[in-house]
Image (tube, rainbow, N blue to C red):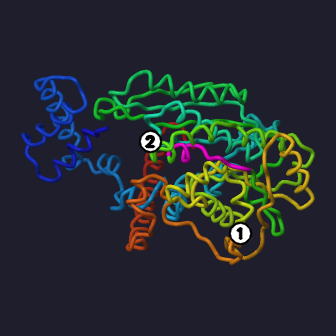
Amino acid sequence: MSDLEGLTRRLLKRGKNDEEIISRIIQEYLDFKDINEDEAKKYSKAILDECKRSDLSYISNRFIKELLEVEIADVTIGRQGVGCRGAGDFFVHKLIAELSETTQKPFLAPNSLDDAGAVKLSEIKGFEKYEDIIVVSKMEGIHSRLSDFPFICGFHVTRACLRDLYVKGAKPISIMVDVHLGDDADVGKLFDFMAGISSISELTNVPITAGSTLRIGGDMVIGDRLVGGLSAVGVLTDNILARRNIQIGDKILMTEGAGGGTIATTAIYSGNHEVVKETLNIKFLEACELILESDYRKHIRAMCDVTNGGLRGDLYEINYEANCGVLIYEDKVRKLVNPNVLNLLEKVGVDYLGVSLDALLIYCSESAVSKIISDLSKIDIKCFEIGYVDNSKEVKMIHIDGKEKTILPRFRESAYTKIKQVIGEDTPEKKDIMEKKIEIAAEKSLEKRKNIINYIKTNSKIKN
């Protein structure tokens, strides 16, 4: 994959002349496409011309310049660990949640850092009579390292998206797909991706209702990568199972897990391809269906999935939102990890507490514990009580050796591929400086939003 526009702009900033830039872009074209040099040169000149014409430094209109300029934080996404489901990612997502806040408040907002969001239908103008209906929505990005394996990519992103609706107590009713492919990706890649998505759709009886298919960067990006995401909508007429409902003394149950996209990625890129088949199941979704239809649903406070930050990351986030602490027994957790998956993780040196396990966490009152475990056992799903909620405000774990320790999320999730292990999980030395820069950039973007809204309202014939 090559971002020709990004490359051209970077070379311009470095002071390269036109001939040097065109020569470099030509080489990129010849590496990716079966075209001759004359054709590549024609394309390269067009790209250089567009990049020069769109350079903001030549804009004299201050309003337009401020509108188009990015509020630079001088911290890259990769260095901050955004998307890596660790402490660095959590920090940025709290700021994203602040940027998501508007005067129209949802029932479950992004600032809750929960699995999904929700609105009460009765709070929407014209739908006041539907006071018992809550609409839950979720957007899930695809696993980036599964671009070359589109079926398994589509399968796991769909399953993960529906998971996040189920854990809020909602019944999924609609799946929507957003997929972007590089200019050189084979059309068959798109079909294989959709086959993976529709497999989960068929298994769960949730229809695919809409979607969007685009090229990455249009003509400015070449290569065959596949990126995008999946969204889904669900409904419920009962209490939403949000993290904020958790109470001191609640018991924590966990179901067995064999992982999803992360484990499939670990298996493929470590050469242990056979482990991928362990991830092909819908046990999580079946467990949720059973629980949500039970008479003890009212005794369940919250449910969550053990996702890409791993158990250590999820418990930290849940504690933050629920304003509580937890004590967890590692021996119980370890027994719930699929043996073949656990062997794989130990073989490649990955901490199983820091990766997605596709396991279900259930926070409930003590009265429901035995019934939940018994009912799940009847449909061949293992479930144990792994701990309880306390007021410590910490994630404490009694390890297999009997020692109690406080655990914290690392800056990044467990490094589950070779390149991630080379990059490492350690907190950057300049973490505090980076965070301050990021906060300033977020504040500037909020100010920009305010200015643009005021401009539009001032110039609108319909006064709000």
Q: Is 310 on the left or on the right of 403, as rendered?
A: left
User: Could you tell me residue 108's position as x and y percent?
Assistant: 69, 51
Q: Which mark is residue 252?
A: none
| Residue at 50% over, 48% down | 266
Amino acid on which disc 1 is placed = Asn
Number of numbered callouts drawn: 2
Q: Mark 2 packing: few (<14 Cα in 10 Å), some, or many (20+)? A: few
46 to 134, vertically: above or below: above
| Residue at 28% over, 40% down | 3
Q: Which residue is mark 1?
A: 323
The answer to whether mark 2 and mark 1 are in CB contact below 8 A is no
Q: Mark 1 packing: few (<14 Cα in 10 Å), some, or many (20+)? A: some
Q: Which residue is mark 2?
A: 459
Q: Is 29 on the left or on the right of 396, as rendered?
A: left
- Whether residue 170 is in magenta: the answer is no
Residue 56 visible somewhere in the drawing:
yes
Q: Is 322 on the left or on the right of 380, as rendered?
A: left
User: Could you tell me residue 84's position as x and y percent?
Assistant: 49, 55
| Residue at 20% over, 34% down | 47
Q: Secondary structure at mark 2?
A: loop
Amino acid on which disc 2 is placed = Asn
User: Could you tell me residue 389's position as x and y percent?
Assistant: 78, 68
Q: Is 223 on the left or on the right of 157, as rendered?
A: left
- Tell me the magenta residue range: 256-265
Position of the N terminus, as image quadrant, is top left
User: Could you tell me residue 453's position as x and y percent?
Assistant: 48, 48
264 to 148, vertically: above or below: below
Position of the C terminus, as image quadrant, is top right
Q: Nearer the viewer, mark 2 or mark 1?
A: 1
| Residue at 29% over, 29% down | 219
